Image (cartoon, rainbow, N blue to C red):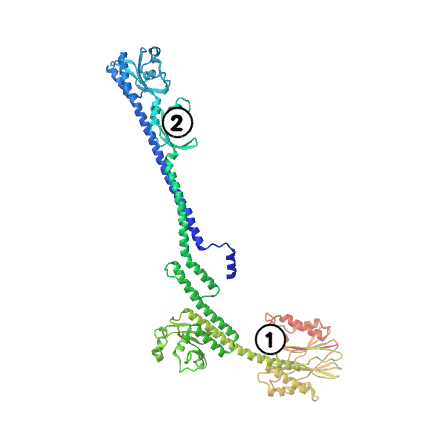
Amino acid sequence: MNASSATGQAKGRFFFSIRYKVMAAMSALILILFPLTGYVAYMNGKSGVEAQIAQQTTGLALQTLDKINHHLALASYAVNLTNNLARSDVVRLKNGNEIIRFFQEMKRTYPQFQNFYFGDEEGNFWMVPQQKPEASILYDPRVRPWYQKAMRSENFCWTKVYIFSSTRRPGITAASMVRDNSGRTIGVVGIDIDLSSLSLFLKNMPIGKNGVAFILDSAGNYVAHPDMSLISTARKPDKVLSDAMDCLEGKKQMTGTIELNGRRFFAAHVPHLDKKWVVTVLVPYESFMGNIYNIRRSFAITFAAAILITILLGVYLTTYVTKPLTALVGLVKQVREGDLKGYIESSSNDEIGQLACQFNAMTEELSQRLFHLTTIHDLGKIVGEIFDLRNLLSQIVVNASHSMRSRRCSVAIWDQTQKRFSIKCAIGFKESEDHIVENMPLRGDSPILKKLRELCEPVIVNDITTDPRFSDIINMDIRLREPGQDLSFIAAPLMAHDKFLGVISVSEKMDSRPYNDEDLTLLVILSSQIVVAIDNANLYEELLLKARVDKELEIARNIQQRLLPPLPPSIPGLSISANYIPATEVSGDYYDFLAWDQDQLHMAVGDVSGKGIPASMMMVMLRSLLRYEASHGNLSLSEIMTKVNSLLLKDIDPSMFVTLVHAKLDLKTLNLNYVNAGHCYPCIIHEDGTISKLHSTGLLLGMFEQDDYAQENFQLKKGDILFMYSDGLEDLENEEEVKLGIEPVLNRIVQNRHLGAPTLSSEITALVNEYRCSARQFDDITYIILKIQ
C-alpha cells in the first residue's frame, strides 16, 4: 500500500486525535475506577454499619430484657419478702386487718404493681386495693390458677398471661405458697402485674428514632407492646413470628432484616427462658443508614466534580502534551512529501523532547541517505548511458567527492603486466579543487596503494599514523609525517570476479565529522559501479568488434552463398535436388554441379576441416580449382583429383585438409564414374529398396602427395537414387547428445523412394529438424539427391 492510498483510507475513517483519546482515557478511568472504588467503599461501609446495627439492636433487646427482668424481679422480691415475714410471724396473715395494712404499705412502695393479695386454705381472700365486700365473699382463691400453680410448685412461680377479673386487662401473677414457722401451709400470696406497665415501660424506652420493642409469648401473642391496643386483640405479628419462635425454640439470640408495610427493619430476638417469652426489637433501616445515604449522595456530588475537574485537567494536559506532537505530525507530512528540512524546537528532557531529538536526527540521516541514493541513482544512469570509460570515471570521482563532502577522490588501476598502479582519474590534486586529472603519473611506488591491495577490503582510516594496519608503512613515506597532512581517508577495492582491478579512495573531509560506515557503504557501492563501468566499457568495445566481425561474416556468407549453385540443373530423365545447412555464418562444406551438357553431368560434395572464415576461404579455393580443372581439357576424374591435391598442398595450412567426392554421370548410358578422396560414402538406393555404398578410392586432399586417385564405375538404372552427403548429417546430435547416424536418413529415403528428389530433400530436412529439435548444430550439413526417372 502506498502513502496516498493509506492517507485516503485514513481520511475515510472517523478520526480521533490523541488529545481526545487521552481525555477519553482519563474520563473512562475516572468513570470506571471512581465508581468502583466508591461502590466498594460504600458496600464495605454498609456491611460494617449493618454489623454494628445488628450488634446495637441485639444490645437494645438484651437491655430491654434486663429492664424487664429488673421490673419483674421487684415483684418476685415482694412476694418472697411477704412469705418470709409471714413465716417469721412479723406479719400475721390470719389477721385480716394486719394483712390489709401490710399490702397497703407494699402498694405505696411498689405502685407499679396492680394488686397485692393473699388467699388461705379456708378460702378467705384479702386484696389491696380492696374490692367490694360481696366480691370477696363470692371469690374463692383456691380455684384460681395462680393459687393452684403456687400450691403445686410449693415455691415461687409465675402464671401465664391471663385477663384480670378486676380490671379486665391482661397481666401475670407472681405467686408463692406461704408456710408458718412450723412449716404448715397456710395459703398463697400473690402480686398482679398489669402488662400495660410493661407496654408503658417499652414505650418510654428509647430505641433509635423510630424503633420499637415488644414481647411475645410462646403462642405468638403480644405480651407487651408500646401500642397497647394490640395486646387486647388476637392480632399476631406474622412477619416476625417465625423468627421469634425459632429464637425461642433454639434458645438463642437471632438477628436479621424484614419488610413491614414497605419499610425495611433490622430485627433482634432475645429469648426469656423463664417466661418463655421473646423480646423483639425492630429498628427502621433508615434510622441507622441515613449517614450511609448521605455519604452516597456526597459521593455522587464528588464524582460529578471529579469528572468536571478531570475534563478540564485533561484538556490542559493533552494540549500541553499534543502540541509538539501536532507539530511533529505536520513535519512528518512534509517528510512524506519529500521535504526533509523540517526541524522541531524542543527544550524538554522528557519523552516528547527525546522524540523531537530523534525525529531531527532521523530527518538529517534521511536527508544524507537521500543524497547518497540520489548520487547512486545518478551514477547508475551514467553507467547505463555512458560507455566511454574516461568520461565515466570523471563523472564518478566528481559525484563521490561531492556526496562525501571531500576535496579529493581518485581511482587507481592496477596494471597486472607491469605490476604497478596508475591514477586513472582523480579530482582535488591540483590548485583548482574542481580540476579533473587523468592518467596522473605516480612518483615511484605508492606504499599506501600497495597496502590497500594487500588488505583487499573496504577500510576507514581516521589517522593513518595510529592505525595498526598501516604501521609498517609509516616510516616508508616521509610525507605522512609532514605537518598539516590530512591523515584520514576511506578506500574500497575494485573487484571483478575475485580479480583485483584497482582502488577508489576519498580523502580530505571538508567538514568536522569523521568518515563513518555510511560513507564507506556508499564508497563500496561506487566501487561496484566502477567495476560495472569497466565491464561495460570492455563489453562495449567487444560488441563493437563483434559487430565489425559479424558484418564481415555476413559479407563472407553472402559471397559463399553466391558461389553455391542457385538451382540444380534441369535435365530430362533426372530429378535433382541439393541442400546446404551451415552450422555458422560461413563454413567449409561445399557442393557443386561442375559442368554438364547433353552427354554428361559433373557433381561434387566436399568438406573442408574447421569452421568459419579459414574453412570458407579454403572452400572457395577448392571450388575454383575443381571448376577450372573440370572445364579445361579432357582429363579423367582421377587426373583432376590428383592435380587439385597437388595445388592444395602448396597453399593449405598444415592443420587443414579436404575430403571430396567427385562423380560424373553419362546421361546416355547412366554409367556413373566417381573418385572419393576420404569423403563419406555415396549411397545408391535402388527401386526395390536395397542400398549400395560407393567406397573411398583415395586419401584426403591437401595432406599427402598422391599421384593416383582410383576412379570407380557404377551402372545406374531407372528408379535408382544417388545420395551424396557430408559428415555433418550423420554427426548431428539431439538434446541428449546422441548422434543421428546415416541409417535413419537412408531409411527415410527408402520409405519415400517413389517421390521426386525435391520432395526427398524436404523429407531429409524435416528429419534433421525433428531430431535436432532445440539442440545446437555443430557441423555443416550438405547433400545432393539425384533420381533416375
Asked where in the image residue 102 lies, by quadrant, the reply is: top left
The secondary element bearing badge 2 is classed as helix
* Residue closest to the eye, 303 or 569: 303
What amino acid is found at the position of numbered circle 1 in the picture? Phe
Asked where in the image residue 517 lies, by quadrant, the reply is: bottom left
The answer to whether residue 469 is seen in the rendering is yes
* Residue closest to the eye, 292 or 693: 292
624 to 723, vertically: above or below? below
Nearer to us of marks 1 and 2 is: 2
45 to 775, vertically: above or below? above
- Disc 1: CA contacts within 10 A as few (<14), some (14-19) or many (>=20): some
* Mark 1 → mark 2, Cα distance in angstroms: 123 Å
* Residue closest to the eye, 73 or 684: 73
The secondary element bearing badge 1 is classed as loop
Judged left or right of residue 781, residue 107 is left
Determine the residue positioned at 47% across, 77% down: 394
Q: Which mark is residue 245?
A: 2
148 to 734, vertically: above or below? above
What amino acid is found at the position of numbered circle 2 in the picture? Met
- Residue 514: give x, y in percent of width and height: 38, 71
Asked where in the image residue 316 lies, by quadrant, the reply is: bottom left
* Residue closest to the eye, 450 or 443: 443
- Disc 2: CA contacts within 10 A as few (<14), some (14-19) or many (>=20): many
Determine the residue positioned at 51% across, 55% down: 13
Q: Which mark is residue 543?
A: none
Which of pointers 1 and 2 lies earlier in the amino acid sequence? 2
Task: Name the residue beneath numbered marker 1.
Answer: 778
The answer to whether residue 217 is seen in the rendering is no
Q: Quadrant of the C terminus?
A: bottom right
